[in-house]
Amino acid sequence: DAGVIQSPRHEVTEMGQEVTLRCKPISGHDYLFWYRQTMMRGLELLIYFNNNVPIDDSGMPEDRFSAKMPNASFSTLKIQPSEPRDSAVYFCASSLPGLKTEAFFGQGTRLTVV
Amino acid sequence: EDQVTQSPEALRLQEGESSSLNCSYTVSGLRGLFWYRQDPGKGPEFLFTLYSAGEEKEKERLKATLTKKESFLHITAPKPEDSATYLCAVGSYNTDKLIFGTGTRLQVFP
């Protein structure tokens, strides 16, 4: 398996623009997590899905952030409108069923909002 | 509230100089403690899972141990290629999600 695949790897956008980040989880994994990583706050969980259903979105910072998982092999994280403070590395991770399994991470999307 | 604290924030070692990284945690019902390695520009890479106090796991120069309050990642005779940020995370039975610490940035010099 190719692992968790994220696109794009880098995104530079202007303040106010819409940004969409994409993720393809590992086949057979039914948990999908979206994290944001910054120097100040480390890795923060934004939202996670189980079997394509959002379970906990309490980490989503504002209504400007939204996430969807239309099927088991694809998820998006959208920011509209984007702001400079959204600049960070966004990671997607997936894991197998069961509470004792580890999560596998993608390579991340580095977002810069100017 | 579930919490993870890692120390030190940064560690500089000479090649061959063994040391330990600490991960202190507070969690209601530990279902697993996870160690990850992260290289610059990459996603975290899974290393170990520990499930109960007293458990130990080893991989090459790394050994992870677990007590009821903390975990240690021991690095024996490190090499420059061990330089990375090491992240610790805990999962509880109350939730499916992992709570991460802020990591220890390890640099090993030849």
Image: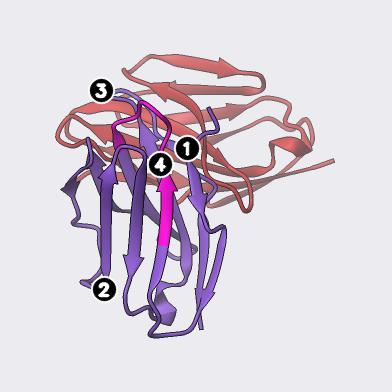
Chain colours: A purple, B red
Q: Which residue is mark 1?
A: B22
Secondary structure category for the residue under label 2: loop
Distance in Å between CA atoms under marks 1 and 4: 24 Å
Q: Chain of mark 1?
A: B
**Image location of residue B57, percent across then percent down:** 50, 16
Distance in Å between CA atoms under marks 3 and 2: 31 Å
User: Is residue A30 covered in magenta?
Assistant: yes
Q: Which residue is mark 4?
A: A93
Secondary structure category for the residue under label 4: strand
The residue shown at (42%, 60%) is A21
Q: Are marks 1 and 2 on the same chain?
A: no
- Please say if B20 is above or below B107: above
**Image location of residue A59, percent across then percent down:** 24, 58
Q: Are marks 3 and 2 on the same chain?
A: yes
Q: Amino acid at mark 2?
A: Arg
Q: Which residue is mark 3?
A: A98
**Image location of residue B53, percent across then percent down:** 33, 18
Secondary structure category for the residue under label 1: strand
Q: Amino acid at mark 1?
A: Asn
Please tell me in which quadrant of the rendered image residue A85 appears.
Answer: bottom left
* Mark nearer the N terminus (4 vs 2): 2
Question: Between B21 and B43, which is closer to the camera in this rendering?
Answer: B43
Q: Chain of mark 3?
A: A
Q: Which residues are magenta?
A: A21-31
Q: Which residue is mark 2?
A: A64
Distance in Å between CA atoms under marks 1 and 3: 27 Å
Q: Amino acid at mark 4?
A: Ala
- Please say if B20 is above or below A41: above
The residue shown at (43%, 38%) is B88
* Mark nearer the N terminus (3 vs 4): 4
